[in-house]
Each structure stands twice: as structure tokens, then as C-alpha cells.
Image (cartoon, coloured by chain):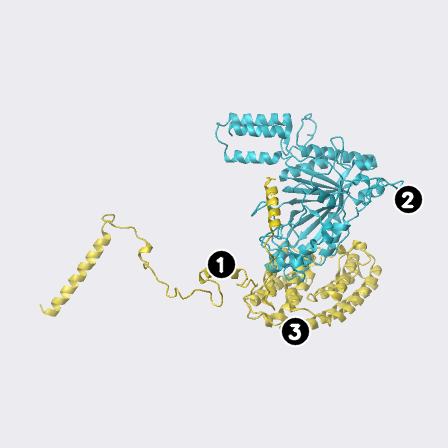
Chain colours: A yellow, B cyan
Amino acid sequence: MKPGRRSLWLLTAIVVLAVCAFAGSALAPGGSGDARPFAVSELAPRSAPNPLAGRLQKVYGTNTPADRYGTEIADLEDDGTNLAGEQISELSPLPPRAFTPPENEYRAYAERWISSALAGAASLRRALASTDRPAAIAAWESTWSDYLHLGAVYLTGAAATLNQAIDGTPGVLPGGTSDPHFVGLHRIEMGLWTGESLDSLIGYDMRLEGDLERLRGVVAHVQFTPLEYATRSHEIIEDAQRDLLSGMDVPWSGQGVLGTAAGVAATEEVFHTLEPLISGRENTEGEVRAELSMLSGVLKSISRHRHGGYPSLPELGSYEHEQLNGYVAGALSALEQMPGTLETEARPPIPKLPPPSLSEKAAERVAEQAAEGTS
Amino acid sequence: MSPLDRRQLLTRSAALLGAGATGAIAGAIAEAESHSSPAAPSAPEQALLALGDELAARIPFDGPHQAGILTPAQAQTTFVALDSIAPDRSTLEAALRNLSTRARSLTQGDTVGAEELDDPPPDSGILGPINAPDALTVTIAFGASLFDGRYGLQALRPRGLERMPNFAHDNLDPARSHGDLLLSVCAGQRDTVVHTVRELMRSVVGHLTPRWSIDGFQSTKRGPTPANHPRNLFAFRDGTANPDVNDARLMDELIWIPPARPLATPPIGAAATPAASRGSGEPSWASGGTYQVVRTIRMHVEFWDRVGMFEQQKMIGRDRVSGAPLGGTDEFQDPRYDLDPEGKRIPLIAHIRLANPRTPATAEQRILRRGYNFDRGLDEAGDLDQGLVFVAFNQDVQRQFATIQGRLEEEEMTDYITPVGGGYFFAPPGARGPGDWIGSGLFV
């Protein structure tokens, strides 16, 4: 045999013996000898010295010990509080001036809807004068819906007073439905749906036209703070859910769906004006757009099945009702992020109150004893 | 159940219900003993013993003031407003007497009597053969409408008793508001309240008819100390700044109509009116009574849940978890508005700051709150119809409750709540004994 071939045989024999030895040990029954139970720790390095030990003592930029970071500091930040006790956001505040273009755009939108409501009120007056109740009801629905499209006109000062006259409900008035200050759209609603003579409602409509005209002058100059405008983006539908879908504010006509649809349209306009500011800040834009789209979709579906109109709340099918309630709640869950996403200032920390005095602590002990029945 | 524990239960029951009822319980125990061995009480037996203690709690019906006012709020309640349909004054008087008699019997614990088999049972029997008192209180109060012209009671109307007005932001439903009478039925267990309402209605049927009612419950006290108050459905602790009901002098200043003292010189034209207490101007029969304000306040909890924690706390003025005033650490800490005149710590329109500014000038405006949560299921929008049955007792509605409510019109929380019902009522003084009844002063 040549020396090279001998070496090859030798190598092959060693490999075969090694394989047999390994297989034999693997296949042999265990439990003998000093075998120890297997443990993951067996595989872990005995110790892994921290190469940064002795160098990281404090959280960068603070006097906070580094060993607190993983627990207390992180917990605080999860709660939205920084080390100085300030309420913090992951977003940098927006400059208030960024809200000027959206508000201007919305103001122009609102003026268009007031004009439309005024035209509706004039139609309503004509229908009342001609004692045509179906036409009057249609004109009332149109006028009220147009008015609710204003939605985001933040109702303070003169606008609030006019809103009470135009869209106020009797519950807040001392005399209820008999109160002389119960005028406006809901007074006319009561008359139309309870069979009052149409002649008797003309005076209320004329008052309504005057109030809408005055509101047009107010809206042209109305000022919103950024917080008011951002808050309104979710409050319009909050109000619709609370007052309209519940039936609370429309006891005679039951037109809560019509009113909600107007509120959704107003919200879409506010959202549209604010989109440039929201874009890229967290995921608010995408979530709101998706939820509003679903809500609009169900409203369109409801309307499509009524040839373009909306049913009263009692006429709404049970599945339609569930869908509407559910999508309204879904939209609100997305819209609730709007004010936080549009924050314009970092909140200052809440000043600390001096610790409880000895007398307060003593009073608390007495209260505790009383609660325990020991004194 | 061990013999010792059985004796304990028997002793408690004897003290609780008298010999007749004890006989029934003794029978039940003998029955239990015949089926069990003398061993340590099982967990269900221990629970039964603990419940026995709760059911045994009895609050006197008679006294200078009615029970259910200073009484620590029991876990369960029902408020029932009634209107009188009694055709005349004497029928009304008889109905009120029946009401007190039945209420006294139920609050002190009684047994369900036997009747002829052909007769309807005198008691619905839903609590079994024994109506254990269960800390039951029945507080009877009158609305302003009882003093209209129907029964000739106009001159006896408590001076401050008016129909509750609509405050700003109210949306009162007439079907859930006002009434000639209000019964506040409070007890430890729900079935005790349900039984009591059923029996009381039965006692006045045909004379007093129900107008509206609402059920309520207390949140469980969950600490961290026994003194910490439970939370309302906005998750904030409620009742922290209530005046101390153990301070009799304070209660005289804030809650009770003072004793009548005859005027030295009756005012001109006062001959036809009953003697009035000096200063208060209240009719003498009202002394020892108090005004009860009830407001059914819907809380829009889904809307609230969509508000940031920071905003929630600013609206209330307290830390949601601890109940401490903002900036503080302890529920019972003084908010120290004097150190915060600009509202940097607690906003000037925060609820706690408007409700109780803690100044010498507003000290006499304090009220005693005794509210309950309510849960009425769902509304038409699929939202939870939940809220607070706000209940306040005070000596002078205008000086106290109405003044505070006027201040609260400014608070931001108004967007999240809607008062939908309730009314102003007057809770007369307590009955003097078994021969007396609530409201007897109106018929002397």
C-alpha cells in the first residue's frame, strides 16, 4: 500500500470510530454515573462584566442616578411626566400661528352655511304662510341641518347667546316649553310636529331669520383659540352623540340622524382644514380619516335607502342603529387624539402643596378611627 | 356550624328581632344542627354569620331628626317620588300616618304575619319569614306642590320650599322631576330596598301614587385607608369635604331648622299664621327638619373617558388616584387656595374650588352631600345611562345649595354632565315615638 493511501485509510478509520463512539454514547441508556440535570445556566457565561460600569453614574443631563432609569424614570415618562414634574408630550408643540389658515378657511365655510340656513328659513316662512305642513317640515329639516353644519363655531360670548335663541332647547329655561325665551328652531319643531297652527309659527321664523342674520355678522369676526378649534374637532360629534342620537334635543321630530350627519360633515371640514398640521404627527391623521370614512359610509347607506333623506330615530332599523352608534363611538375614539396631537404648549409643572400639617394628620386619624368604628 | 357560633347567631338574632323571630331562627339552627357535626364553621357559615351582623344593624326610626340624613350612606337605595291623589285632607293625613307606621315597622325589623289562607299575604315575603332591619332607613320628605291649595296647607309651607328651578345646563324631564313626596329608602342589601319600596307603596295605594323613581348604589370603599372616600363614576373620590356629621353644633348651623321660639311681638297680620322661629321665619312644625335637594345628574361617561387625565384632574381640582388636591399628596389635605390666588395649581374654575371656596364668607354655605351612583342601562345612542343621584341636605336652599350651584355654572365639567331630574323637598323632623308620624305637625 502506498503511504498516501495508508494515510487515507487511517483517517477514514478514525472518523468511523469517532462516529460509532458518539452514536453509541447517545443510544446508551442513561441514568448511570454522575450525570447532572441539564440547565440553561450551564450554557451561560459565568459573568459578563459591564464594560460601562464605573462610567455611567447619572442619566445624561440630570442628577438622577443611572440605576433608577430602568424603573422609576421610565414609569414617570410613561405617565407623561418628565424629571422636572412637567407634563410632557412626545410631540413638539405647534406654534399658535399655524392655526390661522385653518381657522380662516373654516370661517369662510361657516359663512356659506349661514347663508344657506337663511335661505332655508325664508323657504320655511313661505311654507308656513301657505299652510303647507309637509313643505314646512321639509324646510325646517333643511334649515336645521344647514345650521348644524356650522358645528365648530365655538359658542362663547355673542355667538353663545344667539345659539341659545336659534337652537336652544326648552329644558334649560325656567318655564320649559312655555318659557317666553323658548324660540328658534326647536320651538318651530314643537309646533310642526304637534299640530300647532302654522300661522302661529311665522313669528318664530321671522325671529329666527333675524338671529341668523346677526350670527352671520358675529361669525365673520369670531376668534378661536387653537385649543378651542382643536377641541371642537371631536366635540361636534360628542355633542351629536349626547344630544341628538340620544333623542334628547329632538323630542318632537326625532331627527337625530339628520343632525348627526350635519355634525359629521362639519367635523370632516374641521379635519380637512387641520390635516396639514396633523400630517406626520403620530398616527392621528390616518386613524381619524379611516374612522370618519366608515361613519360617513354608514350615513350614506342609511340615506341611500331613504332616497336621499334620513329616517327619524324610531324609524331607524335596529341594525342600522347599531352600526351608526358603533361607528360614531369609533370615530370619537380616533378624534379624541386631535387636541393632544395639536398641542401648542408644554404644560408647566403643578406647584407642590405644602405637606399636610400636624392638625390635618390628626384630623385624618380621627376620620380613620371613625371609619373603622373605633371611636 | 359550631355550637358556639350557633349560640352567637341565636343571641344576635334575639337582640335583633325579638322572641318571635328568634324562635324562627332557633328552628332553622336546630334543623341545621341535626344535619351537621359539631365542627368549626365552614366558609359559607362564616359568611352567613357576617351577613347576619349586617342584617342585624338597626337604625332608630324615631328621634328629633329623621334617620337617613346624618346616617352613613348605606350601600343601596331607591328614591321614589309620589304625588298625592287623596281627595281630602283627612285622607292625606291617614296615608301619611300609614306610611310612617309601615316604615317604622320595616326599619326596626318585623316578622311576616300569617293570614287566612284565602287572603293575600300581608307582606310580599320576599325576604322570608323575617324582615331583618339591615340598617334600613326611610326618609320622608315633602315637595312644594303638597302645599298648594288642595289640602289647605299653604300657610304651613316651609319658607324655602319651592319647585326646583332649571339651572343653566339643566335639561330637566318633567316625568323625572318634582313630586308631592319623596321617599329615600336606603339599606345594606338590594333586596331589602326592593322589599321596602314594595311594602311602602302597598301601604299608601289609592292615596299616594308613584311619579318617578331611581335606584342607586354606593361604590365600594377600596381604601387605601378606611377613611378614604369611595369614587363616583368619573373615578374621583366623592364626599371628601363634607362637614362632620358628629359635630352637633355644626349640624345645627348647616343642616337643621332651628327650634321655633315664639316672637315677643307677633308681626302685623301674623295672627292667622303658625308661630315662626325667630330669624328663620320657618313655621314651627318645621323645626328639626331640613331641606333635601335631589338632582339626577346624567354623567356622559364615554365622553369623560375620552378626556386626557390632565384635563380631568384640572376640571375637578384633585388627583384622580389619591384624591389629594392638585399638588398635594393626601385626600384630606387643605387645598390652600390662599397660596394659589391665580389658580396655577388648582384652576379658579375647578369643581372643588367653586363648590367650596373655603373662605370665612362661604363657610355657612356648606352642604351635607349623600349622593348615590345610578346605572340605568343604555340610552338610545347605545351609551351607558349612568350618573349621580346628587343628594344634599341643608338648612337654607338659597343660602347654601342654590348659591353653590350658581357658582358651578362656570365649571368646565358642565359639558360632561346633564342634570335631568330631581327636585327640592323638605324632610320634616323625626317622629317622637310609636304614636307619632312624619308630617304630623301639619295636621295639629
Residue A162: image tag = none
Residue displayed at 79% across by 47% down? B160
Give the position of the C terminus of chain B as an image quadrant.
top right
Q: SS of the residue at dot 2? A: loop
Output the chain of dot 2.
Answer: B
Output the chain of dot 1.
Answer: A
Residue A362, given in percent of the width and then of the height, sits at 60, 47
**Which residue has dot 3 on it?**
A100
Q: Write down the quadrant of residue A355 in the picture.
A: bottom right
Residue A168, given in percent of the width and then of the height, sits at 75, 60
**Which residue has dot 2 on it?**
B268
Residue B316, given in percent of the width and then of the height, sits at 64, 56
Label 3: few (<14), some (14–19) or many (≥20) C-alpha neighbours in 10 Å: some
**Which residue has dot 1 on it?**
A72
In front: B92, or A25?
B92
- Looking at the image, do the residues carrying marks 3 and 2 touch, with CB atoms under 8 Å apart? no
Q: Amino acid at mark 2?
A: Ile
Q: Amino acid at mark 1?
A: Glu
In front: A88, or A24?
A88
Which residue is situated farthest in the left direction here? A1
Q: Amino acid at mark 3?
A: Thr
In front: B211, or B30?
B30
Q: CA separation, marks 3 and 1?
A: 41 Å
